[in-house]
Image (cartoon, rainbow, N blue to C red):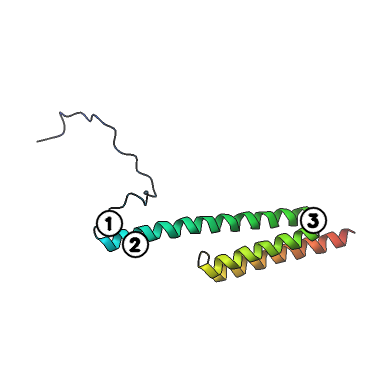
Amino acid sequence: MTLAGRRCTHAPPFRTPFPNLESSVANTRSAEKRNRQALKRRARNVVVRTDVKDTVKAARTAIAGNAGVKVVDALKAAEKSLRKAGSKGVLKKRAVSRRVSRLAKAANRAKTAASAKA
């Protein structure tokens, strides 16, 4: 039987590059449990990553604006959220150290540039 004479009555399903994890095709109870655990971890990690992005962005804008005391507070908050994400395993510890170092270096660079202008 060939498909040449048949006409498709429905559209093929849309496939995303990242399939929805909730529609699991797990075959065993343990695989279903691992899928549930992965969903919980993913939700938690998304929240932590968003917090890290927000605090780092706030620190970068404070550095760009040469806000003085605000830079120090924003830098402390960014470092705290980065270190916490590293300790929880959301980000790798070396990546955290690198990002903290780059933020501190940018803050020091802005500080010296502001003092040179004055």
| Marks 3 & 1, CB-CB < 8 Å contact | no
Residue at mark 2 to residue at mark 1: CA–CA distance: 9 Å
Residue at mark 3 to residue at mark 2: CA–CA distance: 47 Å
105 sits left or right of 1 in the view: right
| Marks 3 & 2, CB-CB < 8 Å contact | no
Q: Earlier in the sequence, mark 3 or mark 1?
A: 1
Q: Quadrant of residue 94?
A: bottom right
Q: Position of residue 40 (x, y in %)?
A: 43, 58
Q: Quadrant of residue 38?
A: bottom left
Q: Position of residue 43 (x, y in %)?
A: 47, 55
Where does the C terminus fall, quadrant-wise? bottom right
Q: Quadrant of residue 99?
A: bottom right
Q: Residue at x 82, y 61 (%)?
A: 113
What element does badge 2 sit on?
Answer: helix
Q: Residue at x 72, y 62 (%)?
A: 106
104 sits left or right of 9 in the view: right
Amino acid on which the number 2 mark rests in the picture: Arg
Amino acid on which the number 1 mark rests in the picture: Ala
Q: Which mark is residue 67?
A: 3
Q: Nearer the viewer, mark 3 or mark 2?
A: 2
When the figure is inspected, residue 7 is found, relative to residue 82, above or below; the finding is above
Residue at mark 3 to residue at mark 1: CA–CA distance: 53 Å
Residue designated by label 1: 26
Q: Earlier in the sequence, mark 3 or mark 2?
A: 2
What element does badge 3 sit on?
Answer: loop
Q: Nearer the viewer, mark 3 or mark 1?
A: 1
Q: Depth check: 11 or 73 in front?
A: 73
Dot 1: within a 10 Å radius of its alpha carbon, few (fewer than 14), some, or many (20 or more) residues?
few
Amino acid on which the number 3 mark rests in the picture: Ala
The outermost residue toward the left is 1
Q: Which mark is residue 34?
A: 2
What element does badge 1 sit on?
Answer: loop
